[in-house]
Amino acid sequence: MFSHVMLGVSDLEVSRKFYDALLGTLGLGPGVANKNRYFYRSPGGTFAISTPINGQPATYGNGSTLGFSMASPEQADAFHAAGVANGGTTCEDPPGYREGPAGKIFLAYLRDPDGNKLCALHRPAK
């Protein structure tokens, strides 16, 4: 459905360090620079960070969450830990399993250095 997702950031190098560590837990290499942006490409799509091209401050979307699919709870924990160790902040409940209408899922939430809300999500096999 999506070709790419791009988030606005205020400090490109601080965010590059954060996302290089975070996305490294998913097996992605460091971001590839292109002017005021970094791109992270995978077979499933592209994630990018950019300073806003309109010159206005980068802001996060209140109520917005960007979810990343995880292969295991351990990968979700590593994703969360890498984010917190590189300038992110934990939010919501601690990483762990939750029961919901769609069944049991493992979630780990954090915010990037600009306040964008991220979620690591693992759906166990039924």
Image (cartoon, rainbow, N blue to C red):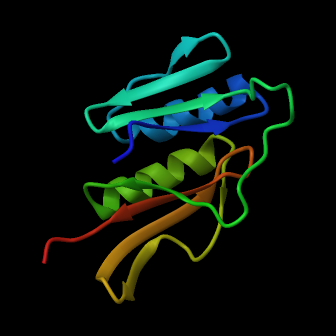
Residue 63 horizontal/vertical position (percent): 67, 67
Q: Count up the numbered dots.
A: 0
- State the residue in front, 74 or 110: 110
Front-lying residue, 79 or 40: 40
* Residue furthest top in the image: 35
Query: Residue 2, located in which quarter of the rendered image?
Result: top left
Q: Locate the C terminus by quadrant.
A: bottom left
Q: Residue furthest left?
A: 126
Q: Residue at x 58, y 77 (%)?
A: 93
Please state which of residues 22 and 33 is positioned toward the viewer in this rendering.
Answer: 33
From the top left corner, tell me how far across and down residue 26 is, in percent.
35, 41
Q: Is residue 10 left or right of residue 65?
A: right
Left or right side of 18 for 98: left
Q: In which quadrant of the rendered view does residue 72 lie? A: bottom left
Residue located at (61% from left, 50% from top):
84
Residue in the image at 46% along x and 22% along y: 30
Q: Which residue is at 62% across, 73% downward?
A: 92
Q: Is residue 99 above or below residue 69?
A: below
Q: Position of residue 120 (x, y in %)?
A: 44, 58
Q: Is residue 94 left or right of residue 12?
A: left
* Residue 112 at x, y percent in the picture: 66, 47
Please determine whether, in this image, residue 67 is positioned above or below residue 96: above
